[in-house]
Amino acid sequence: MPAKRTSARGVSWANGSTPGTSIPLAGFYVAKPGVTAETLNRALAQGLHLLFTPGIYHLDRTIEVDRAGTIVMGLGLATLVPEGGITAMRVADVDGVRLAGLLIDAGTVNSQTLLEIGRQGVHTDHSADPISVQDVFIRIGGQFAGKATSSMVVHSDDTIIDHTWIWRADHGDGVGWNVNTADYGLRVHGDDVLATGLFVEHFRKYNVEWFGERGRTIFFQNELPYDPPNQAAYMNGTVKGWAAYKVDDSVDAHEGWGMGSYCVFTSDPGIEVDRGFETPVKPGVRFHSLLVVSLGGKGRYNHVINDTGAPAYGVETIPSMVVSYP
């Protein structure tokens, strides 16, 4: 279990083994496909960590992670499928929970959320021992017609999100504008949340919506949905399209580096998006190295961020870039 690093760069093993501690296998409940959510929750209540072996796990109730320091880890991208519109996993607002190596595959009955971190309105300082979400992927559709209003919702302060792909499917089975419906990819309410390697794609509204203070994103990749049938179906009020990454107007401090969004509207190549990124204009809200690009001219961005940045359109697939904002 790697130790937390601060003010660091580069690999952790350059001068020897990665600092950290080892957890014996006896401290884990080793799950196999077919286990019930009741059994998993009972193991958690007994103080065990969870280790999911490869396979698909159908859940009839939410996995509740309430104990500080709990590890929930999947091997081979073990897949959790919530049934009946439940939330697949909910983490309490406690220190040091680590989620890693899991895929959450939305069920066919709409879930309001698929993964919840923390509790709404609760702001506890977890900076000494943050919750981390690493190599956790979320899929809506592709295997079957999954549905979810919001995929991942983060309430806990200081949460670390590392290498996460949150994807409303654009191909496979159960795919279509009104089939695998999903409005929001990642919604962040916690303060001091860090996201590194954030991949969020194809949601019908905001792919990322950030409400917490002092959030940071280092590398963001996005593709807007392929399948809005027309411009009228892809409007945010009077605004054309939905920004890929939205910082709420109430936020005073936020920063992002290396962030891109692209479009390829296959159903109607004439669809326009007014802004790839949308943020309040405040001294504490800053972005570095942004781009938007229309793939093969199937769609158009009118601006990169707010009303800044040249349009991106045309079959040449040339990105429009903003080096620094504001």
Image (cartoon, helix red, strand yellow):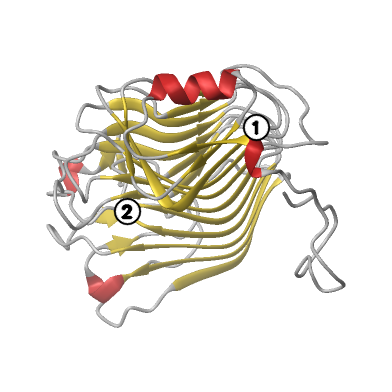
Look at the image and tell me in which quarter the C terminus lies.
bottom right
Q: Is residue 243 visible?
A: no
Rendered view: 234 above or below 317: above
- Left/right placement of residue 16 relative to residue 205 reads right
Indicate the position of residue 114 as horizontal and vertical percent values.
39, 32
**Front-most of 277 and 309?**
277
Indicate the position of residue 202 as horizontal and vertical percent values.
31, 51
Quadrant in the picture for residue 95: top right
Q: Which mark is residue 279?
A: none
- Mark 1 closeness class: few <14, some 14–19, many ≥20 residues within 10 Å: many
Q: Amino acid at mark 2?
A: Val
**Front-most of 149 and 74?**
74
The secondary element bearing badge 2 is classed as: strand
- Mark 2 closeness class: few <14, some 14–19, many ≥20 residues within 10 Å: many
Residue at 85% in and 56% down: 7
Residue at 26% in and 52% down: 169
In front of the other: label 2 or label 1? 1
Sequence-first disc among 2 and 1? 1
Q: Amino acid at mark 1?
A: Thr
Residue lying farthest to the front in this orientation: 26
Quadrant in the picture for residue 117: top right
Return the residue at label 2: 273
Rendered view: 286 above or below 213: below
The secondary element bearing badge 1 is classed as: loop
**Front-most of 144 and 228?**
144
Return the residue at label 1: 70
* Contact check, label 2 and label 1, Cβ < 8 Å: no
- Left/right placement of residue 113 relative to residue 50 reads left
Indicate the position of residue 159 as horizontal and vertical percent values.
66, 38
Q: Disc 2 versus disc 1: distance between alpha carbons?
A: 42 Å
Indicate the position of residue 34 as horizontal and vertical percent values.
31, 34
Residue at 32% in and 53% down: 273
